[in-house]
Amino acid sequence: SYIFALGFPVVMLIIMTIVNNSIPPEAGMDIFELKNLAPGVVLFGFTFVMLFTAILMAKDRCGSFLERLYAAPVTAAQFITGYIAPIMVLGVLQCIITYSAALIIGIVTGDSLSLGGMMFSIVLLLPCLLMFISLGLLFGGIFNDKAAPGICSILITVATILGGVWMDIKTVGGGLFKIAEILPFYPAVDLARGAVNGCSDGRGMGLAVTLAYAAAALLGAVLIFRKNMRKI
């Protein structure tokens, strides 16, 4: 699971770069250019961190592991922190590996990427990472280990489409883009792309939206965990 979470975004980065090289310049499609693709793939990787977290929580909850831990004098918030901290490290490592791969690919293809911009992008994406981890804990706390992956798979599809990872959702416009602006996925991707490209002006609202969803998801995870503790 660790290898998959860390390596799959790199595989997708390579595949979509090959796809981009086959698109004629007159098509005017820049969504798969490395400077736009890499931040989108990072968010795509976060969705699998969510899936991994949900499966982990669901298995711990459905087994006897958490039942034994509930006997310890630890609060629900402390339990959640214990889950979040190591997975946050995994998510940051995933960002570093993905952006490092993007730098190497950029050297091969002749695309220049800003190292400082990518580091700043990782900082801006931390609330988004926290949100996906919290959603994983939330789904794992509600559903069992068979249902949680299915729910997460639906959200992975929604996040990649409405986040504009594989398509220019802004060009599509209309009601779909308005929905994308309300949800946290597109603002997070747009924020990361702005950082990588050195143009983060006017994206403060995107950060505020991501922070709000991250706080709500974290609160929901804590409340569900506390509810499960009281059942024992």
Image: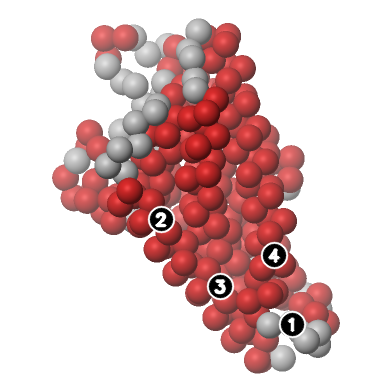
Residue at 70 percent of width and 74 percent of height: 79
Pointer 4: what residue? Answer: 83
Q: Which residue is mark 1?
A: 74
Task: Tell me the kind of residue under disc 1.
Answer: Val
**Mark 3 surroundings within 10 Å by alpha-carbon count, few (fewer than 14), some (14 through 19), many (20 or more):** many
Characterize the local packing of mark 1: few (<14), some (14-19) or many (20 or more) Cα atoms within 10 angstroms. Answer: few
Question: In the structure shown, which secondary structural element does the residue marked by tag 1 occupy?
Answer: loop
Give amino acid for label 4.
Tyr
Look at 52% across and 28% down and name the residue there: 116
- What's under tag 3, amino acid-wise? Ala
Tell me whether the residue at label 3 lies in contact with that at label 2, contact meaning CB atoms closer than 8 angstroms.
no
Residue 18 spot, x, y in % from top left: 51, 16
Q: CA distance from mark 4 to mark 3?
A: 11 Å
Which amino acid type corresponds to the residue marked 2 in the rendered image? Thr
- Lateral position of residue 114 relative to residue 54, left or right: left
Q: Is residue 107 above or below residue 163?
A: above
**Closest to the observer: 120 or 65?**
120
Question: Residue at 63% across / 47% down in the picture?
Answer: 91
Q: Nearer the viewer, mark 1 or mark 4?
A: 1
- Quadrant including the C terminus: bottom right
Compute the Cα span from label 2 to label 4: 21 Å
Q: Residues within 10 Å of mark 4 (few under 14, many from 20)?
A: some
Give the mark, 4 or 3, whose residue is nearer the N terminus. Answer: 4
Badge number at residue 221: 3
Q: CA distance from mark 3 to mark 2?
A: 16 Å
**1 or 3: tag closer to the N-terminus:** 1
Residue assigned mark 2: 210
Say which element carries label 4.
helix
Q: Earlier in the sequence, mark 1 or mark 2?
A: 1
